[in-house]
Image (spheres, coloured by chain):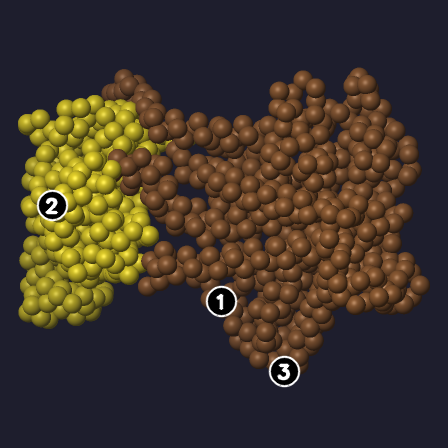
Chain colours: A yellow, B brown
Amino acid sequence: MANDNNGEAYLRVRNLTKKFGEFTALKNVSLDVSEGEFVCFLGPSGCGKTTLLRAIAGLDIQTMGTVEQAGRDISALPPNERDFGIVFQSYALFPNLSVTRNIGYGLENRNMPKADIAARVSDLLDLVGLRDHATKYPSQLSGGQQQRVALARALATSPGLLLLDEPLSALDAKVRVHLRHEIKELQEKIGITTIMVTHDQEEALAMADRIVVMNHGVIEQVGSPEDIYADPASPFVADFIGTTNFVDGEVQAGGRVSVAGVAIDCGAALDGLNPGDMVTVCIRPEDVQVSTEGGGAGIPVTITDVEFLGSFHRCHVMPVNGAGQTFGKDIDFMIDLSAGRARDLGIREGMAVQAALPPEFVRIYRPVGGG
Amino acid sequence: MRDAAVAQAPRITPKVSSEDWIMRAVLVGIALYLTVSILLPLYAILSKSFKNADGLFVGLANYVNFFSTPALFWSIENSLTVTLICCVIVVTLAFIYAYALTRTCIPFKSLFKGVALLPILMPSLLPAIALVYLFGNQGIIKDWLFGYEIYGPIGIVMGECFYVFPHVLTIMLIAMANSDARLYEASDALGASKIKTFFTVTLPSVRYGLVSAFFVCFTLVITDFGVPKVVGGKYNVLATDIYKQVVGRQDFEMGAVVSMVLLLPALFAFAADRIVQRRQVALLSARAVPYQPKKNRVVDTAMLAFCCLIGLILVSILGMACFASFAKFWPYDLSLSLKHYNFDLMDGGSWNAYWNSIELAAWTAVIGTAMVFTGAYLVEKSKGFHSGRAAMQLLCMIPMAVPGLVLGLAYVFFFNAPNNPLGFLYHTMPILVICTVTHFYTVAHLTAATALKQLDGEFESVSQSLKVPFYKTFFRITVPVCMPAILDISMYLFVNAMTTVSAVVFLYSPDTALASVAILNMDDAGDVAPAAAMGMMIVGTAAAVRLVHAGLTRGILARTQAWRKR
C-alpha cells in the first residue's frame, strides 16, 4: 500500500492489526520508512496513529503483523530490546532529577565512564540550547524547555529511531511554531529516522518529509505534504487537510460534470463513470476563480457573507441560477480571495459574481456513504 | 483480498522479558503472602464454625446452638443498637465540626483539627478507662448520669463516639474540601437563601461523604473490642462475646460462629462503602474553584462555641486518663507520683510489654511499608499479566473487611493447626508482625496506589526505551517522588501497631506480651491506674512518632524535593 521506496526500508511495518477486546484499533496496516526520513502520522483522535506508534515502540504490541527495524524482526520484542528514543506528550521528565541527570539517565546504565557521560550530556545541552538551565529541575522550566529536555534525553543514547508522540500539543501556539522549526532542523542535522504523531495538519505539513494520513485504523494516504494537499486520495483526506468545498455533481457526456446547473470541464478525472452518475466534486476555496464580468465562464453566485481573516477574505456564496439550483443539501460553498484581489474586485455582501472551477484544481470522488 | 491478508498475518505473542518475569514473580510472592495471611486463615475459621470440639463436621449445629441461646443472639441486637446510635451521633457531630473547619471563619482551625485527631493515638481501651474515672462508681462527675450506670450501653456509646470521631471527621473534611465555589456563587446570584443553599448545594455535594462516613463508623464501632470490654458491664456485644467464648470458656467453635456473625455486617458495610466511593470520583471537575468562607458573626460564634465544646470533651477525656495515671491513690490521695508506671510490679503488665510493642510497631512499619508499596507499584505499573494484577487488587481489599478479632482468631485456627508447616510461627513476634501488617494492609495499599496514580504513566515506558531496568527507576524515581506517601504509610502502620488490641489479643505469648494487651490485662486484674499509665505510654509514643513524621516530611520536602517548588 505504502511501498513507494525503492531501496531497503529502515522500518518495515507489515499487515499490522491491533485489537483491544472487540475494538479493532488498527486494520492490516503496512508502511515503509526510509533511513533518515521524517514521517508524520496524521489523523483525528481515535484514528489509530498513537496505537501504531506504540506498536512500533513495543509499548503495546500488535495482535497480528510484523515490524522490522534495520533488517531485524522486532515484532514481539519488549521495548528494552528495541532501538528507539521516545518523547511523550507529557514529556514524562523525572521530577526529582536535574536537567543534566534527566538527559544522562539512559547513559548511566551503560558502563560508560563518568567523563564520557558528562561530555555527551554537555553536547546535548548545547544541541537543545539549555546549557544555562543544566542544574534546574523540570518544574522550574517552561513547557518548551521541558520539551527540549525530553528530546535530549531521548537522543542521548543515539537510538536508530526517534518516536515523538504529540510532542508539541501541550504548548502555546507561538512556542509550538518555533519548536517545530527547531525539531525539524535538529532532525536534519542528526539525520535520525523520525516518526511523529500529530493531529495538527499544519504541524505535519510544515515538518514531515512524508505524511501518513490515518482514519478509522487504516492508512488513507501516504505522500509528501505537497502531494497530499494538492492531490488528496479520498474525500476524507481532502477534508482533513486544509479546507475543501464538497459539492454535488452529475456526470454528463463529454467529460463534463454539472454543478448547480452549470456544466464544467473536468478533463480525465471521470474514468469509469457514466453520464447520469452522481459524484462529489471537490475544490479548495483558494482555487476558485472569481470574476465580476457577467456572462463569463463559471457559475453565477451571490456572495451571502464575507469573513475577514487577515491576509485573505473568505466569501460564502449561493448559486443564483434559476430553478432553485444549489450546490447540494446544506452545503456552504466558500471562496478565499487574497486581500488585494478582494479589494480589486470590490467584494461585498450581496454582490453577484461568476465562480469558475478550473479543471486542473477540480477532483471528482464517487460519493461513498456521504463522503 | 484484504480479509485474506488479515488471515495470513501471523499472530504475535509478545516476548516476556526477564524484567517482566521479575515483576510477576514479586507480585505473585506478595499475593501468596496475602493468601497465607488472610485467605487461608479465613477459610480455617469458616470451617471451624462447622465443626465440633473434636474436629468432626457437624453442619450448622453450632449456628443452631448460637441462635437458640438468647444470651448469645441478643448480642446481635445489642451490637446493632449501640452501633447505630453511635453512627447517628458521631456523623452529626463530625459533620458540624467539619463544616466549622472548612466553611466558616473560626480562629484556631489547625488547633481544633489537631485536638480532634487525638483519639487516633490511643487504643480504644484508654478512653473507656477514662470514662470509668469520670462516671464510674468513684467518678468525679458521676452525678451527671442522673443515676444511670456508665457500665453498659451508655458507656459503650460514649467511648465509641470518642474513639471513632477522628476517623469520621477525616472523611467529612475530605468530602467538604471537595466543594466548588462556583456553585455557591451561582446559588448566591440566583438569590437563594443561606438555608436553601445549604440544602441544595452543601448537602448534595457531601452526600457520598456522609454515606461513606456512616459505613466507616458502623464498621469501626461494631468491630471494636476495647470500649465494650472495659465499660460494657453485663451488656454483651458481638466483639466481647468472641473474646469471652475463646478466652473465658475456651469454646473455640462458638467463637468461630460469633466471628462469622460479626463478619457479615462488616462485609456488608465494606461493600456498600466501596460502591459509594466509586460513585464519588467524578464529582469534582478539574476546573472547580475552592470555596473561600466569608465572615458571618452569628454562624462563626456558634461554630466556635461548638468546636470548643467538642474539643474540651476530647481533651478532658485524655486529660482524665493522664491524671489518673499519675494520681497516687484514686480518689483518696490525688498527689502525683510515677508509681503506676512501675509496670514490672503489676499483674499482667511489664515494661517488657512496652518494648515488645515498639519492636512490633517498628517491624510492622518497615516490612509493611516495603511490601505494601512494592505491591501497589506492581499492581499499578506493571504491564500485561492482567489476571494476576486483578487478583492482587482484590486480595489487597479483603483485610479491610475483616474485623481484627476475627482475623486474630482465624490465625489461632490456621497457624495452630497441628499439620500446618507454618506452625512454628505461632506465639512468636513474626506472627504478630504478619497479623498486624495484614490487618492494616488495605488502607496502606490505597494510600500507596493513590500516590502512584499521580505519577506520570510513561516513566516506565521512558526507562524501558532507555534500557534502564525497572527496579533502578523504581528506586531512583518512584520511591523518592513518593516519599511523603511512603512516610505516611509507615507512620500509619506504626501507630496502629502500637494501639491495636483486637487482632493480637489471641496471638501473644508471655514472651511477646504487648503494651495494648497489657492495658487490657491490668484493667481486668483491677490495676486500672497502671492500665491508664500504659495507655499514656502508648499515646506519648504515638504522638512522638507523629512529630518525628511531621519533621521528616517537612525536611524531605525542603531538601530532596526542591523540585516540587517552582
Observer-nearest of A263 and B272: B272
Q: Which mark is residue A313?
A: none
Observer-nearest of B47 and A186: B47
At a point 49% along the width and 51% down the height, the residue shown is B487
Res A106 → quadrant: top left
Residue A76 placement (x, y as % from top left): 28, 24
Q: Which mark is residue B290?
A: 1
Q: Are marks 1 and 2 on the same chain?
A: no
Looking at numbered disc 2 in the image, what kind of residue is underneath it? Gln
Q: Is residue A228 left or right of residue B27?
A: left
Res B196 → quadrant: bottom right
Instruction: Classify mark 1: residues with Cα within 10 Å, few (<14), some (14-19) or many (20+).
Output: few
Measured in 3D between alpha carbons, the distance from the residue under mark 2 to the one under mark 3, in whole angstroms, is 66 Å
In the picture, which quadrant includes the C terminus of chain B?
bottom left
Residue A28 placement (x, y as % from top left): 26, 27
Residue A174 placement (x, y as % from top left): 19, 62
At a point 66% along the width and 79% down the height, the residue shown is B301
Instruction: Classify mark 2: residues with Cα within 10 Å, few (<14), some (14-19) or many (20+).
Output: some
Q: Is residue B392 above or below residue B545?
A: above
Residue at mark 1: chain:
B
At a point 70% along the width and 22% down the height, the residue shown is B417
At a point 82% along the width and 22% down the height, the residue shown is B53
Looking at numbered disc 1 in the image, what kind of residue is underneath it? Pro
Q: Which mark is residue A187?
A: 2
Looking at numbered disc 3 in the image, what kind of residue is underneath it? Arg
Would you name the residue on which mark 3 appears?
Answer: B297
Instruction: Identify the secondary structure beneath mark 1.
Output: loop
Instruction: Classify mark 3: residues with Cα within 10 Å, few (<14), some (14-19) or many (20+).
Output: few
Res B162 → quadrant: bottom right
Instruction: Identify the secondary structure beneath mark 3.
Output: helix
Kindly indicate whether the residue at mark 2 contacts the one at mark 1 (C-beta within 8 angstroms): no
